Amino acid sequence: MIALPTSLPLIKISQDNLAACDAEWLRRNLREAAARTEVPEWFADDVVAGVITFLRNHYEGSTITIESLYDRIRDTLENLGLNDLAEELTPTPPPLRISLTDLARKAGTGYELAFFQLLEQRFHSATSNGAEHVYFYDLRNCVQRLTAVRKWTKRCETLQNEITGFLEHEAQKAGKQNPRLSLAIC
């Protein structure tokens, strides 16, 4: 078994994407579901505490699919007689963090076309599986890896703008299907 820093399993969103299990994300989803029922908000917080305790102390795996996690939560809520809350619960993936440097490493130095193909694939994989918050990070290192330079150049600036523009364009297209989609690039 892999030792995870938070001692919580990772959430498997798709074949390509894993996300950290975030209590705040789960709390937000349960509170939104509770708001559509007569269940008080504080109860949603108690459910989250129970889920986190279960995942930390009793769940055996290092990953859990989003569907499996929400099925377990629904089953528990139904066993408690909270069918309304269980029905309102929508499986929304946690915020997803994607390393641009890892994608550049996979593409290889100087292979910008391969990089953009990998970038598009990862972005579409995330958004088509319901991710609402996607964070691409380590842009500067990614650009320097792709351009194979140590010192920042005009070419680096151009490539950085191309990557940012590409992701913003893809987010705009995906936002038509999912208006709650947010994108961050750093």
Image: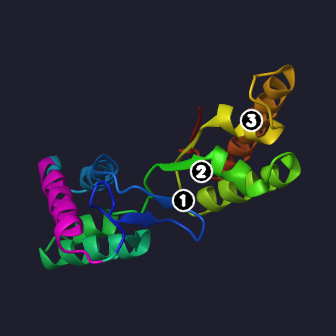
**Residue at mark 2:** 178
**Residue at mark 3:** 143
Res. 148 image quadrant: top right
In which quadrant is the C terminus drawn? top right
Q: Which residue is drawn at 53% across and 55% down?
A: 131
Can residue 26 be seen at all in this image of the molecule? yes
Looking at the rendered structure, the kind of residue marked 1 is Gly
Mark 1 packing: few (<14 Cα in 10 Å), some, or many (20+)?
some
Looking at the rendered structure, the kind of residue marked 2 is Asn
Q: Which residue is drawn at 87% across and 50% down?
A: 113
Mark 2 packing: few (<14 Cα in 10 Å), some, or many (20+)?
some
Where residue 132 sits in the image (x, y, percent)?
A: 52, 49
Res. 166 image quadrant: top right
Can residue 168 be seen at all in this image of the molecule? no
Earlier residue among tags 3 and 1? 1
Label drawn at residue 130: 1
Magenta segment, which residues?
42-60
User: Is 62 left or right of 115, judged from the image as shown?
Assistant: left
Q: Nearer the viewer, residue 79 or 157?
A: 157
User: Is 4 left or right of 46, judged from the image as shown?
Assistant: right
